Amino acid sequence: MIGIQFLISSLIWFLIGGLMAAAMRWQLAWPWSDMPILGSWLFEGEGGQISPEYYTMLVTMHGSVMVFFVVIPILAGAFGNYLIPLMIGADDMAFPKLNMLSYWFMWPAFVCMMLSFAAPGFGPAAGWTSYPPLAVLEEAAPGSGLAQTLWLGGLTCVGISSMMGSINYITTIVQMRAPGMTFFRLPMTIWAMLITAILQAFALPVLTAAVLMQIADRLLGTCFFIPEGLMVADALPKSGGGQALLWQHLFWFYSHPAVYIMLLPAMGMASDILSSMSRKPLFGYRPMVYSMLSIAGLGFIVWGHHMFVSGMQPLVGAAFMLTTILIALPSGIKTFNWLATLWGGRLQLTTGMLFCLGFIAMFVIGGLSGVLMAVAAVTIFLHDTYYIVAHFHYVLFGGTSLIVIGSIYHWYPKMFGRMMSETLGKFHFFTTFVLINCVFFPMHFLGAQGLPRRYADFTHTDSFVHLQPINEFITYSAFALVGVQVVFILNFFGSMLFGRRAGNNPWRANTLEWVAPSPPPHGNFLAPLEVHRGPYEYSVPGRAQDYWMQTDSELSNG
C-alpha cells in the first residue's frame, strides 16, 4: 500500500513538473507572448505573459519537482516498497511504522514546495541546485526570502524521508530473505535497491546537513556560505566570511551519487524485464552485480566534474576527469550484458519490454554524451549550454522515465490484479519514444553552438536568433509529448476498472513476486516460501516449461 501511495503521488507530481516544462518551452519558443488558457491565472506578466523572474522560478521548480518528487520517490519509494518484500519472500518490511513515516514525511515536503511556489515575491529562484550567494542573500534575489526558505524546508523533509527508507531497505534485504535466498540468488532489482539504499544512507546526511547550514545562513545570521564583504539581509547583521564554493562540494557530493540513486533501480528492473521477456538467463549475473557495486563506489569520488568551471586546480580537475571516464566501464558492462541477453532470445515484445529496449537506447545516447562531458576541456565550453540539458534529460528522462513507465506496465498486473491495455501501451511507447528524441536530440546542436541554458529569451541577440526555429520545433514536440501522456493516464486508471483480470503469473516469470496472489494480500504470500534456485533460469533444456520458478525443487519438471 505504501508503495502504491508513493507511485500515485509521484505520478501526480510528474504531471505538475511536465506542465512547468511546457510553460518554459512556451516562453523559449515565443518569448513574452500571452500564454492561452491558464496563462493569465498563473503568470504575473500582463495578459498571461511569463515574467523574467517567474521563468527563473519555473526552472527551479521544474528541476526540484522532477528530481526530488518524481524520479527518486518513484524508483526507491514506490518500486522499492512494493517489490523488495515480494522479491525476497518476506511478509513485510523490517520496520513497518518507519516505512509509513517515510511516506508521510513527504507530505510536509509537498506542502512546503507548493507554498514556496505560491509565496509572495518571485518564489524560489536560485535553481534546483540552490547555489549561494544567490540562495542565501535577500538582496541577490529580492522577494524570494520566504519562498526560498520553504523550498529548503521541503528538501530537508525529502532527505529525512529517504534516510528512513534506506535504513528500512538495507535491514529488510539483509535480514528478512526467505530460506534459501542467498545473496547471489537475489534478482537484479533487489541488488540495485540494496546498493541504492547504501548510497542514500552515506550521501544523504551530507546534503541534509548542508541544507540546514543554508537555512541557518538565511535565518540565524551564520556565514557558512556567505563570502567576506556581503551582508545578510533580513537576518542578524553579521558580515560574511564563509565559502560559497563549499555548498557546491557538499551539494554535489550527494547529488552525483543521486544520479545513480535514480539510475541503479532502473538498471535492476530493466535486467529483470529483459531476461523474462527474452526467455533467456541474464547474461553475466555476477559481473552485473560487481558493475553496480563499482558504479556506486566510483559515484562517490567524481562529484567534482560538476565544478570544472569553478576554477579548481587543474591537477584536481584531471583526477575527477579520469575517475569520471572510468565509470563508463561498468556502465558499458551492463549495456553489453543486456544486449547479450537479448541475442538469440525469443523476444516477447510486450509494452514493458518495448519501454525497456527504449531505455537502453536512451541510456546509450546519454552515456556517450556523458563521456564528452567528463573531459574538462570540453565541459568548460559546454557546461552552461543546452548540451548539458540534452545529456541530463537523455539519461534521467529519456532513460529512467522510460523504464519507470515500462516497469509500471510490467508489474501492474501484480499491483492491481488486472492487465493494462497492450494496444494503448504500444501506441504510448512509440509516440513517447519518437517525441523524446524530437525534444532532446536537437538540444545537442543548440548547445554545440553555445546557446546558454536557464535564459528566458535568445531573440534579442544576433548570435542565437537563427536558432529560434529549432527552439520552436522542440516546443511543439514537448507539447505533443505532454499530451501523449494522457493515453498513459487513461490506460493506468481505466485498467483498474476495465482491464482483463491477470493471474498470479501472466508473464511466466521466475521471481518470487509472481508466486503471490494478484494483488497480494496482507502478508504477501499464502504460505511460507523456500528458494531453491536463481532468478533467471529460463529455457532450461529438458524442461516442459521455459521458466523455472525460484520456489520449484530440483525434481520439479514443470
Image: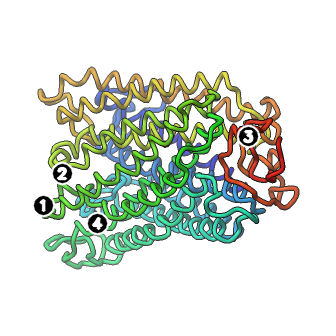
Where is the N terminus found, in terms of image quarters?
Answer: bottom right
Q: In the image, which is nearer the foreground, mark 1 or mark 3? A: 3
Q: Which residue is mark 2?
A: 376
Above/below status of 157 relative to 435: below
Instruction: Tell me the tag on residue 547.
Output: 3
Query: Does the CB distance between marks 2 and 4 fall below 8 Å?
Result: no
Residue 101 position, x and y percent, is 64, 67
Spatial CA distance of label 1 from label 3 is 54 Å
Q: Tag 1: Cα neighbours inside 10 Å, few (<14), some, or many (≥20)?
A: few
What amino acid type is highlighted by mark number 2?
Ala
Residue to which mark 4 is pinned: 249
The residue carrying pointer 4 sits among few (fewer than 14), some (14 to 19) or many (20 or more) residues within 10 Å by Cα, namely some
Q: Amino acid at mark 4?
A: His
The amino acid pointed to by label 3 is Tyr
For numbered disc 1, what is the local secondary structure? helix
Q: Which mark is residue 314?
A: 1
Marks 3 and 4, how far apart at CA: 48 Å
User: Tags 2 and 1 in contact by the CB under 8 Å rule?
Assistant: yes
Give the CA distance from mark 2 to mark 3: 48 Å
Q: Residue at x 54, y 56 (%)?
A: 192
Under circle 2, the secondary element is: helix
In front: label 2 or label 4:
2
